[in-house]
Structure formats: C-alpha cells, structure tokens
Amino acid sequence: MLGGLDPTEQAPALWLANELKAPVVADATSGLREELAHLALTDADALLRENPPAILLRIGDVPVARFWRDLEDIPSTEVFSVTRTGFSGLARPSAVVTGDLEAILHALGDVDPVGDVNGLRAMNKRRKALMEELLITCPDSEQAMVRAFSCFAADGDCIYLGNSMPVRYWNSFAQMAVPTENVRANRGANGIDGQISGFLGVSARCSRSWALVGDLTAMYDSNALALLPQLDTGTRVLGVINNGGGGIFRALPGAASHSEAMRNLLVQPHAYSFKAIAEQWGMRYLVIRTAEDFDQLDALEENSQVLAELIPDREQTEQVRNALAKH
Ligand SMILES: Cc1ncc(C[n+]2csc(CCOP(=O)(O)OP(=O)(O)O)c2C)c(N)n1
C-alpha cells in the first residue's frame, strides 16, 4: 500500500513497486496512482478483507483505504511500514522502519519479484469492469462526476482533495491514464475546517490548481476566499460537490435506521447554492448537473478563479454505491 509520499520518495517507491510486481493500492497522495495503474487494485477494500495477504508492505503516510483500518482485526497479515514519520498507524503490532526511503531501498539491494501470488489482480478485474460500466450508465452520479472532474484536473500542476468523500472517491474513481504527481489531501480527523485555506496554500506556486471538496467543507471555510486577491496569479478551480449536506453520513452503514431527527443532525441537509459565495469573492461561477455541463471547464481563461458547483443525481449515486456494495 502506498500512502502519501514526498516528491523525493516517489522515484524509489515507483522503482520498488515495479520490481516487486505485487498488487498495489496507491492513494492519490502518493502521486503514483496512475503510473502504477498496471499493478493496481481498484476500490479493493472488500476483496482484501475476504482475501487478506500474508504480508503487507506500506510505504509513506498512513493509507486512506478502509482496508488499512480493517488490518487492526486481521492479525494473520504481517504488516511492514517504511515511513519517514515513524508512525505505525496501527494499534496492533507491526514492524516499522523509519527513515529516508531511498537510503533504505539502497540498503535492501536487489529485490526479487513477488507478482500477483494470490491472484488478487485477476479477481479485481471483474470489479474494475463493473465500475467502468456503472460510470457510463450513471453519468450524473457523484462517482462519475469525480471521474469527469479528474480528467480536467489532470492538466493542472496541483490537485487538492478535502473532506470527506472526495478523497475516497478520487482514490477509487479518478482517471488512471494521465500521471498526477502533486496531489494533496486532508480528511478524517483533519476536520472540515480550513480546507479552502489549505487549497490556497497548496496552490501558491502553481499556475493551474484544482480542488475538490464537499459542500459542508466548502461552507465551513468559505471566507478563506477573501485571500484570493493577495495570491500569486494562476488559474484556480475550486470544485464543490454539493450533495446537500454531509453525504458521508447518508452512506454510512446503519444510516437508514436513524430517526429523521438524528439524520438531520448528522447530515445537516440544506438547499443552498454556491453562486452568491462565488460572486462575493469575485470568482467565476459554473454549475454542473450533467456530464455535458463539464464542457464549461474546457477553455478556462488564464489566471481565472473559478468555483464549479457539481450537483450530482442522488439516485444515480446510490445506484453506483449499491451495485458496488453487492460485489
Ligand atoms: C471541524 C469538524 N467538524 C465536524 C467534522 C465531522 N465531519 C466529518 S465529514 C463531515 C461532513 C462533510 O460533508 P461534506 O463536506 O458535504 O462532504 P461529503 O460528506 O458530502 O463528501 C463532518 C461534519 C469534522 N471532520 N471537522
């Protein structure tokens, strides 16, 4: 598994993965997600839970994938982490090597290929095919919108992903054809606060920056956009998936059994638009409700500041989620 990597760690991690030829789960923040597409398992949490490997090697930051958390309860999988931070990221025993990745790999010397010993990649093929089919049949779902947005964002020199579903969606559904090395993300315990500020910081020296965040996350830090006039020039596209509240809380297991009052507290449903926010801070506003609406991202003027509000179809989103959950 590859978590977030520093730029200096990307070449050694890529070398190791290509030598080992073992199945790879690469977070977007590794910057290697697309370059390792030939070895990758896509959206493979359930597959890994049912077929846990005997040995798992993690490189970089603590991975986002659900399977990493499941590892707490799978003691039969021996976990080795190589990380500059030294954090094991697990509450159960595991081996951690702390230090500079390139130096550690040098010390390892030659590496023999492992390959797809458990046939995981072969088993993952059907799921990949189903996923691709669903993205075509449900083009206005959140998942398909993330795929479409990622195709445009691939031309940028930085991508920022914010709480909460955008990070997971990106790992599972974003395009795999064009390498995107500079991807930053904040999720989970990092909170929904400060995410637009985070994006603006990441975009500081980029000529073309893209962000994708949830609607509550965007609202929580919308006044950060007041900083725009102080920043270096460059095109910035802030994509907001407006699914009318905290979509993650609609998707959690057991969500259907909550009372309506509890659901409202968790989801914070709303019908606000981001048009006025874009106008207030002098941004160009685009609204995207269908696959065709993405054409508006085709020819962005240089140095434009754009807020693109993505309004997905809830039924199609659930259709994709349910179809994938069954397999
Ligand atoms: C400061 C803070 N308050 C509350 C939370 C709990 N929390 C996690 S995800 C989330 C909802 C995020 O909603 P949204 O930004 O719309 O993204 P979506 O779930 O739709 O992807 C909340 C409130 C948090 N992470 N940080």
Image (tube, grey):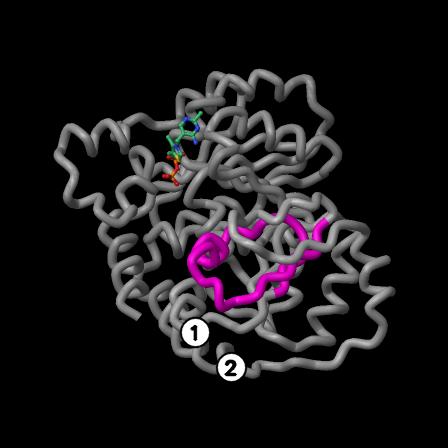
Label annotation for residue 278 = none
Amino acid at dot 2: Asn
| Identity of the residue drawn at 79% across and 50% down | 99
Mark 1 and mark 2 lie on one chain; the one further toward the N terminus is 1
Residue 77 against residue 208 in the figure, above or below: below
Give me the residue at 47% from left, 38% from top: 188
Q: Which residue is mark 2?
A: 118
Q: Quadrant of residue 310?
A: top left
Q: Is residue 250 magenta?
A: no
* Residue 146, percent from left and from top: 45, 51
Helix, strand or loop status at disc 2:
loop
Left or right of 128: which side holds 80? right
Measured in 3D between alpha carbons, the distance from the residue under mark 1 to the one under mark 2, in whole angstroms, is: 8 Å
* Residue occupying the point 63% across, 59% down: 58
Q: Are marks 1 and 2 in contact (CB under 8 Å)?
A: yes
Image: magenta residue range: 57-83
Disc on res. 51? 1
